[in-house]
Image (cartoon, grey):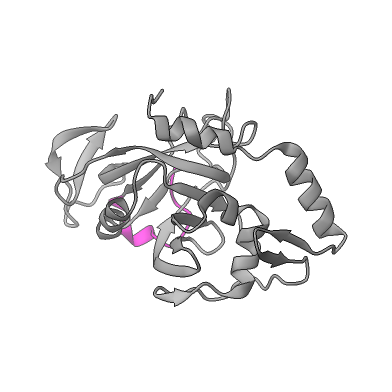
Amino acid sequence: MSSNPTIRAENQFIEPTWRRTLLSSALLLGIPFALHGCQTSAGDVKPHHQIAPAATLPQDVETQLCEVGWRERVGDRLGLWVSVERQQLIGIKGREVKFVYPCSTGEKGTGNKENSFKTPLGWHAIDERIGDGMPHGAVFVSREYQNYNWTPENKTAKDLVLTRIMWLRGLESGINSGPGIDSHDRYIYIHGTPEEDKIGTPASHGCVRLKNDDVIKVFDATRSGTRVLITEW
């Protein structure tokens, strides 16, 4: 387990069950609900709105993010949103979309159970960051560099972890943190992959895969403690 004080601080922001229940009830009843300046209502959301980098976050998407506490947990810092439906990893700072990269989540869908090979939902934080300065395509086994590098010519069916690793820690007790469902204990990473041709479709064993060029960019833009939200939508 990490002794990183930033991550310990993150755990203080675990959203209480009563708050999630209250918000869910309000949305079902169509009651407007405000979160730190975000005006939300059940009828505001329009799914599949296109998100472009270097643009202002669309209002309907901002509404959805506010409903799950984005403003409270991320504020004006950079946060990562992994959309399973879109198969995209999106970097957001304030209301600006900083980057959008195609990704690959669990081939078996979403879920939090140990050994399920599914991608966990909810709020996470980047904990350990591994691979800084390593070559493009660096091969890691148990987070240790193996002194060789994958190249696109080396086709493989192995689930290799390449280039950079951002190890996620769940921040929501009973959802992605705790015995049998713990994202950190399940070794859920954001990482590079040799199966770049499958990026944009659910194909991983539960991690969030990125193209190797893209995982370097995300690694360089983030730090330990950066919040990561994974959603079905």
| Residue 206 appears anywhere in the view | no
Asked whether 205 falls inside the magenta stretch, the response is yes
| x and y percentages locating residue 209 in the rendered image | 38, 51
Outermost residue on the front side: it is 37
For residue 145, which quarter of the picture? top left
The quarter in which the N terminus is drawn is: top left
Q: Is residue 12 above or below residue 45?
A: above
| Residue 105 appears anywhere in the view | yes
The quarter in which the C terminus is drawn is: bottom right
Question: What residue is shown at x 43% (from left), y 44% (from top)?
Answer: 207
Asked whether 200 falls inside the magenta stretch, the response is yes
For residue 142, which quarter of the picture? top left
In this rendering, position of residue 196 left or right of residue 8: left
Q: How many marks?
A: 0
| x and y percentages locating residue 173 in the rendered image | 62, 31
Question: What residue is shown at x 18% (from left), y 44% (from top)?
Answer: 138
In this rendering, position of residue 50 left or right of residue 151: right
* 191, 69: nearer the viewer: 69
* 176, 7: nearer the viewer: 7
Question: What residue is shown at x 80% (from left), y 64% (from top)?
Answer: 32
* 94, 221: nearer the viewer: 94
Q: Is residue 127 above or below residue 153?
A: above
For residue 172, which quarter of the picture? top right
| x and y percentages locating residue 96 in the rendered image | 45, 70
In this rendering, position of residue 231 left or right of residue 79: right
* Helix, strand or loop for the magenta stretch, by majority: loop
Magenta part of the chain: 193-206
| x and y percentages locating residue 180 in the rendered image | 58, 25
Outermost residue on the right side: it is 29
